[in-house]
Every structure is written in C-alpha cells, then in structure tokens.
Amino acid sequence: MPVPDAPVTGAHLETPGPTGGGDRPSRLDPAIAARLRRTPDGLVAAVVRQHDSGEVLMVAWMDDEALHRTLTTGRATYWSRSRREYWVKGATSGHHQYVRSVALDCDGDAVLVSVDQVGAACHTGHRSCFFTELPVTGEVTS
C-alpha cells in the first residue's frame, strides 16, 4: 500500500491566505506574489510534469509560502487543503520531486512545476495521477 507524503514538521497554519496564511507572512518575493491570482482561500493550482518527457504527473495546490519553499529548496512543497498543512512530496513515501523549473501561466492563477520524479507521483502508487482514460465520443475535426 502506498505511503502518503508527510506534512512538514512544525509547518501547520490555520488558514492559507494571500500572504502565506495564518499569522505568518510568506517569504515569497513580492514581485512574484504580485503576479499571482489566488482562489478565495489564497491558493494557486500547481500542475506538475516530468521535466524531460512532459508527462503530466499530478495537480496540487500552493499558497505563497509553499511556492517560496519550492523555489528556494528545489523540493516540491504543497498546501494540503484537507490536512491544512504543508507537505513536501516524498518526505515519507520516498517518491521525491526534484524541481527543475517553475513557470507562471499567463493569468497568474496556476504554476507549471517541472520535476525529476522519483517513484510514483500519485498517492495510489501510480506513476501519474492521470491513469483513468475517459471515452471521447465526439467527432474530431481538424
């Protein structure tokens, strides 16, 4: 059975927000923070892909502080909406994500995180979270 990734010890915050959440300000570069368009709960979507193949691995959420940690440590760090705490991918599972690059989308409401994925990206044990194909029955036109 796959081991879920662990939260970052001592990183629990009550509520993420536009400046990183709770009563702790984020250390994210203000120029980057100014470009982000966050959800009402202070988050941006993080689309994660394998850096060399482009394979989409997963989608997670980041607040300003998670993005700061990702950019400055080279380890993918996310905000868990269900546990309400930060988690570093692979901290307990060993399925690490070593960050190669991060790009902000044109609207500022999502980031593309290119990683070197070690092991499975999905908590189910699959390489990618996108392993369930859905039938497309519409007519394809070019």
Image (cartoon, helix red, strand yellow):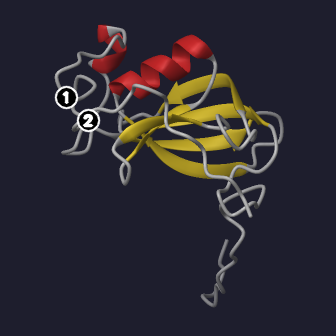
At label 1, which amino acid type do we have? Gly
Residue placed furthest toward the bottom:
137
The answer to which of 140 and 115 lies nearer the viewer is 115
The answer to whether 29 is drawn above or below residue 118 in the figure is above
Image mark for residue 125: none
Question: What residue is rendered at 72% in x and 58% in y?
Answer: 2
Local secondary structure at mark 2 = loop
Give residue 140's quadrant in the image. Answer: bottom right
Local secondary structure at mark 1 = loop
Give residue 27's quadrant in the image. Answer: top left
The answer to whether 133 is drawn above or below residue 32 in the figure is below
Which quadrant does the N terminus fall into? bottom right
Task: Give the Cα separation between the discs numbered 1 and 2.
Answer: 6 Å
Question: What residue is rendered at 36% in x and 50% in y?
Answer: 81
Badge 1 vs badge 2, beta-carbon distance below 8 Å:
yes
Which quadrant does the C terminus fall into? bottom right
Question: What residue is rendered at 64% in x and 34% in y?
Answer: 91
Question: What residue is rendered at 47% in x and 28% in y?
Answer: 9
- What is the tally of numbered marks visible in this picture? 2
Image mark for residue 22: 1
At label 2, which amino acid type do we have? Pro
How packed is label 1: few (under 14 Cα within 10 Å), some, or many (20 or more)?
some
Q: Is residue 99 left or right of residue 52?
A: left
How packed is label 2: few (under 14 Cα within 10 Å), some, or many (20 or more)?
many
Q: Is residue 113 left or right of residue 66?
A: right
The answer to which of 38 and 137 lies nearer the viewer is 38
- The residue to which callout 2 is attached is 16
Q: Position of residue 39 (x, y in %)?
A: 25, 44
Q: Position of residue 96 (x, y in %)?
A: 72, 35
